[in-house]
Image: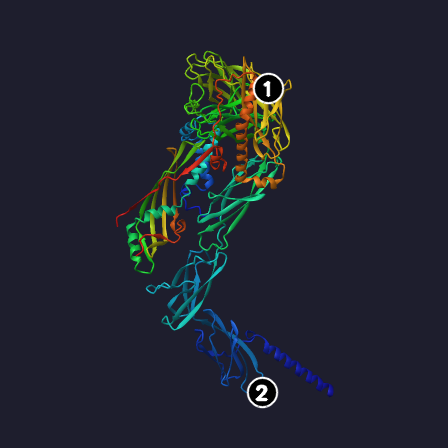
Amino acid sequence: MTDESTTVRSIFFDSPADAATALGAALRSGAAADEVRGRLGRMPGAAKDAVLGEAGKVAAGVLEMDVTDIFRSAWTKHAALCAAAEASLDDPAEQVVPLATHSVTFEQDPGVEIQVANLAVATVAVHVQLDIAVRGLLAVVEAGRLTRVRIGAADFSGALEVAGQPLLERQKSVELRHALRLGNGIRLAPRA
Amino acid sequence: MPILAARTTIARRALCALAMVIALLPAHADPAPFKPLVRITAGWPGDQVNVYFANSQYNVVDCRLYWAAAEDKKADCDGKHHAVIDVPDLPPGPTGLRWEMEYGPPASPSPDGEHMGDEIPFTVNGVRAAADHVEAEPGDLVTVTFTPVGTGVGIGDCGIDEPVKAACPTETDVSQAQITVPGNALPGSSVALHWYAESGPRGFGHSTGGNIGVKIRPLPPAEFDVRGQADTLGPGQPFIATFRSLTPGVTITGCGLTLGDRSACGSSDVAVVMIPPDTPSGTRLTIPWDLTYSSTRPGEPTDPAPTATGELRLLVEAQTSELAVTVQPAEAYPGDEVVLSFAALRPGVSIVECLAFFPNDPGGICQKSPRRWFARTHVPPNAPPGPTLLRWGAASITAGGRPIADSGAFVFTVRARAGGDAPVGPPGNPPGDPVRQFTPPRDADPRPPTFVATSDPETAAPGTAVTVSVAPLTPGVTITGCTAGFRGVAGPGCSGAGGGAWTARPLVPTSAGPGDQPLDWHVTWSDTTGHAGREAGTIAYRVSEPGTRLQPAFRVQVTPPKAKPGEHVAVTQSALDDGVTITGCEAGFSVGASMASCRDTGQGWVADVTVPEKAPAGTGAVLWNVAYDRAGPGTADGFTRLEVMPTAGPSFWGKLAGFGGRITLGAVALVGFVAYRAVGSRVRERWKQRRARSAELPDDVDVRPLPDAGLFRTDLGAPTREPHPVIRLSPIGGSPRATLREEPP
């Protein structure tokens, strides 16, 4: 079984297929479609549908970003965590750092460029916004790295726009201990 | 008397036997008159337990002790009817100390005595340890809880020392130790957690230890998305499959498809195999795929690299060669117009739409006239001399409503223009300024019906009437009204023309300049379900300049449309325009073959062309020249699609398959074109003079010694190394922006 709770896509859609279907449908027939269709010019209608359907699949693909990367980017700026990481450089024991509730805001504007005969004719813009409230986090810090989350949850509020048109808003809570893939940890303090 | 004595002996023996049987019966059957005395009923392994069997009223003959859970641990009584036994190394908890003895009255003469026995409840003191998980994954936390067993037993120290160390906290009364299952624990195996505990009345004095087995849960299988670009393809077409990992932490490191030979993926995890061109239509191919991957999932084996395999299924349907595609002219200058004609060769198949374009050019969408489907496109004005690709695609539909897609590319030669010559383009709209498509109002139906619009004639001068016919292609749809007219001018209404088509005759505005002018049509429709709607479209109608004549169009049919090297095909040429009479023609295969002259059969001019023995399999072209008379002599040329079938089996194609084969195919085709241009031009000019009996050439023919187009300096890799998608979708990552907001402490 695949852990589906770790990507930006999974905040909005249950499966990659659902994402491709929803984005493709939005591009083919939603309010977002007119502008993109117009830019495809004299292309036959059936061809436009096919192109926009495929663009939906590609757009779904760009959402496959691991949420760990979001937290990686945010926590490297977290004062308490970074301070604990600095301290851990001199203390070989792991430190459990309780973090107060904090929030992370994430925005990204990926897209799909459509080229016809080597000419870029249209760009399907996707806007992703995530407001994340992190609660009850006990982070384990060792040797300047955040190596583990002992406990903690994140409440995601996400909004997805396609071609400038709102498509979807979702809320989802995840248990960070299972959602994050920290690997060798997140370096928070430079090596001494 | 002897008989009486014998009976007495028998009776005595029977009584003795009965007594022995009774003696062997369980003690509870005969409650013991006394019990042995035991001082302690709980103890640590190794402690000694003293049991006293002596009794003042009975004579204890023999006695012994043993443990119910360890019967080999026995102790016999000494001469004082006292036995000592060590507490065995049993798991802490209740157990039983069994005793047995033989006894009798103090004056009993019997040396055997009565037998009896019982069990004394006993508690083995110590510490029990239990884990909160019997199964876990690498990286999971496992908590082991230590529980004292026995009255007054306390735990002074405890923890886990294998496979990782974790001690119970000393500052609390919680006797628990927590470990993280090692990342290298092999899924499916069992990890032994070795624990230790120090216990005693004050928490110390006795050491206990043991192992707890935790089964490492097998990793869920990695999931991959492997899919082909189509479920149905034609023989000779490339089958493209994409590979993608759906499992976080799993990365594909290698992949490939096997159809004959194995074709490995490129860096983008895409593999391509060629469907053998001689694959019979209707064949269902099973194409195995394989991949290797690396994983950052804890505990996943990495050496050797894990693999996954599967199969893709593909239906092969011959349909690519059922569409005749003719290009006119055979080569052109930058900026020149090139016209492609499309014709469905299979009965009951109707073309729905088609297009053609050169790289870096908007291309042309097909139009339909009563005689043909055709698309006008232009050689890009900045196209360098030499070979380029002319791409085309067409969508058709069978009588049963099944869609058929077909596409391909010809190698087209761009002629070198002498310096200073202005590009020869169509009048009016310059290349790059196509007629804007009319966008119909959005219909609630996500799948609107399909209509086809026909204009007749294909070109007309200002002030001339054009017949526009619109007909539905979707079964069950009826047009209920329509208009058609040039943009900016009120169009006349349509009238039913029979067969479901509606016709209008708008006039080309007298103010219209030469070139493509938008001719919009609008229809209202309803279907058998009561559903109704509107649809619209635009024809880029070619307005001719009064007094000028466009190059006449010719229909060129290759029969059969597929042939093997060495086989003959008939190339039939006929004029599509009224008033044009063919006076002679010739045709030849593009790969360096000689041109065969046509003969007039009365039903068309036919040339017998032999496919060269070394012609590579795949899409080829038959070059043709035609001399005609239209109030004066003229010539035209072009080429028409011919599918070349392989002569050998899959091994032959296997050598050609893949990109290398395509490069070879393209290179051979280009060599043919060069030979045609270098040699054929001279032949053509002589032929023109012979056939047309005139040195006077059309205005748009410029006979010059061709400078070296630099064919072999051209980088063939770029246009031919891989199939160039007509439509390319490129993901754009965007810049992620993450901001952190900490609440004040």
Q: Is residue B163 left or right of residue B30?
A: left
First along the sequence among labels 2 and 1: 2
Give the image location of residue B263, x and y in percent.
Answer: 54, 43
Q: Which residue is most to the left? A: B744
Q: In the rendered view, would you say A17 is above or below B12? A: above
Q: Chain of mark 1?
A: B
Q: Chain of mark 2?
A: B
Image quarter for residue A29? top left
* Amino acid of disc 1: Gly
Give the image location of residue B499, x and y in percent.
Answer: 57, 18
- Front-lying residue, B462 or B602: B602
Sort mark 2 into few (<14), some (14-19) or many (20+) by Cα contacts within 10 Å: few
Name the residue beneath numbered marker 1. Answer: B584
- Front-lying residue, B242 or A64: B242
Give the image location of residue B281, x and y in percent.
Answer: 61, 34
Q: CA distance from mark 2 to mark 1?
A: 145 Å
Give the image location of residue B564, x and y in percent.
Answer: 62, 33
Q: In the rendered view, would you say B160 is above or below B600? A: below
- Front-lying residue, B365 or B300: B365
Work out whether residue B613 can be spotted. yes
Name the residue beneath numbered marker 2. Answer: B109
* Amino acid of disc 2: Pro
Q: Which mark is in front, 2 or 1?
A: 1
Identified at 55% across, 74% down, the residue is: B28
- Front-lying residue, B637 or B521: B637
Q: Which residue is most to the front? A: B705
